[in-house]
Amino acid sequence: MSEPLLRVRDLSVTFPVRGREGWPWARPRPLRAVRDVSFDLAAGESLGIVGESGSGKTTLARALIGTVPAAAGEARWQGEDLLRMPPAARHRHRRDIQMVFQDPLAALDPRMTAGEIIAEPLLVHEPRLARREVRARVAQMMERVGLLPNQVNRYPHEFSGGQCQRINIARALVVRPRLVVCDEPVSALDVSVQAQVINLLGDLGRDLGLALIFIAHDLAVVKHICDRILVFYLGRAMELGAARDVVREPRHPYTRALVAAAPIPDPAIERGRRTAVLEGDLPSPLAPPSGCVFRTRCPIARPSCAAAIPPMQDFGGGHLAACPHTGQAGHGEAPG
Amino acid sequence: MTLLFGRRMFREPLPPGTGDAPAGRSLWHDARARFVRNRAAVASLVVLLLVTLFALFGDFVAAWSNEEIDWSMLGSVAENGAPSLANGHWFGVDELGRDLFARTVQGTRISLMVGIVGALISVVVGTLYGATAGYFGGRLDGVMMRVVDVLMAIPYMFVLILFMVVFGRSILMLFIGIGLVSWLDMARIARGQTLNIKHREFVEAAVAIGVRPRRIILRHIVPNLLGVVIVYATLLVPSMIIYESFISFLGLGVQEPDTSWGALINDGASQMQYGTLWQLLFPLFFFVVTLFSLFFLGDGLRDALDPNDR
Ligand SMILES: Nc1ncnc2c1ncn2[C@@H]1O[C@H](COP(=O)(O)OP(=O)(O)O)[C@@H](O)[C@H]1O
Ligand SMILES: [Mg+2]
């Protein structure tokens, strides 16, 4: 296979956090928000990242756009490692990878108008562009995301949440990036507009040939618009595979629990499904369980799970899951 | 704001057929609406305008100039020098027989100027300094703020008096001296606010886009700081005026024939025993009214600009 657009290998992000007492001389403890995550992303492909809140999805996105430092690993963008690039080269690549944030209003500067916000990436990356040209590109982008041209001078607080997210999308796309990272782009929006924004992102991704990383906390949102899905738990990848395989034939007990939580309108699959509801809370990332991080909530956990971190196993067709016992668990698996 | 940061890009007409783009309601518009509803603040603004007009145009209405000595008064100031409409000394005369109205105009001018220049220096220097330290953080922040701490530890009066003694007493030296100390508090305030703002998502979005630190500070941090900075600046103007008045009261500030509120109040106070109370009361009235108005104005601005902070 040729070099993918983005190749992430063993990426880890660690935050130093101080204890609650906060003594200034206390050594900060490492909070490993993302550990040893690997995946490939081809040009034009869309990857869904699914995991509970607090599992490190946003942190992974931040590491990719370069707003938090990575502790280890590499993220190769067309062969070049983004994490170890000299600043000037990294700056050039910022154009290629854009991000749409979770809270659409908070991601917009309250003192700038919609037009100024959307124009900013252009001013940064194409400083020689004539003003007339900038205005035309902004107007064109606004139209593309479904904003009215006469909203160009309005301020973020005058827009609804869905419209703010459209401004965010326009800002991300105006410099024609190759990859857009969408961090739960609809979870802060009204249910009635979620579908519109998801469809907009899906359409834009397809029409512009964009690669998408689409983060969500449940499978329902990503399974329709993503080619592949990465399941995340406590900073680690649990399962990775084609969207269809992951949803129909989840291999990892955690993915099974996620699938169980999202009803599937297909009787054939519904029948074969075990309704395993996940109990308990996400353990603290400051003190993750030894061995498999999921074992404390896993229905098929056994003593050996605490011993070693299970490696990713290939189940064929690029379908990977980090659970050595899943085959023997005897869960009914629907035919694929 | 608009002019300062060149935000006119989208104010020009749009391509034909797109209709017109009405101007948005910026946060400043909202703040103005809230401010106008605050009666005390609006009244204070009117009073300050009147005081400013008095300082600017008082000379044209004054019957006497501020240098002329009314020889007919000399030696009989206590008996004949009281305020009078008939002889044109509306505020009376000072102990040398000079017209107090003209002197008050002159003093108001200098005191207001000290306040405004001091506040301007503090706004420009303090805001940029504090925002830079806060945004970059780390070692740069440490060094920059320790410099502020050290400068703050030096008593400002000592610095000012030293300046006056070393470089001679002049208005310029007064301004430089006040400018040197006035930005320190503002730098701390701006830094504290910046620490909050830089963790907001729109700043992260700007970093992700590739906006350079200089532009982030000028376009994203400073405009979002400005509300707090303006409020604090209106509270700084009075303290600048008080510094200057105190120094002039000590006899170290402005030099004759220049004057200021502090100098006039000092002169008036020293003549009180002779029964020429007007020499104290007129400058004192302007001083007090202006300071009160500035405090009310600052209050009104705070309510208007940071509605959620209350
Ligand atoms: N800047 C930070 N400093 C310290 N801990 C952080 C920071 N950002 C995130 N974390 C921690 O990292 C973990 C993962 O967070 P996050 O990536 O936001 O999860 P998600 O987006 O999946 O909800 C959480 O436990 C969170 O508390
Ligand atoms: Mg998140």
Image (cartoon, rainbow, N blue to C red):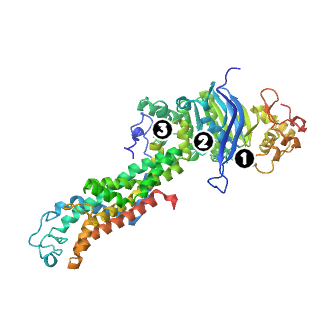
Query: Residue B224 location, x and y as percent?
Result: 47, 49
> Callout 3, which amino acid?
Pro
Q: From the image, tell me which residue sits under label 1.
A: A285
Q: Is mark 1 within 8 Å of ligand 1?
A: yes
> Which-is-in-front pick, marks 3 and 2?
2
Outermost residue toward the top in this view: A2
Quarter in which the C terminus of chain A is drawn: top right
Q: From the image, tell me which residue sits under label 2.
A: A101
Instruction: Indicate left or right for B212 with A225 as reference.
Output: left
> Callout 2, which amino acid?
Phe
Q: Is residue B6 visible?
A: yes
Q: Nearer the viewer, residue A162 or A108?
A: A108
Instruction: Indicate left or right for B34 with A308 as reference.
Output: left
Q: Nearer the viewer, residue A121 or A197?
A: A121
In terms of sequence position, does the residue under pointer 2 or pointer 1 come before the other? 2
In terms of sequence position, does the residue under pointer 3 or pointer 2 come before the other? 2
The chain letter for the residue carrying disc 3 is A
Query: Could you give the CA–CA distance between mark 3 and mark 1, rounded to whole angstroms?
Result: 46 Å
Element under label 3?
Answer: helix
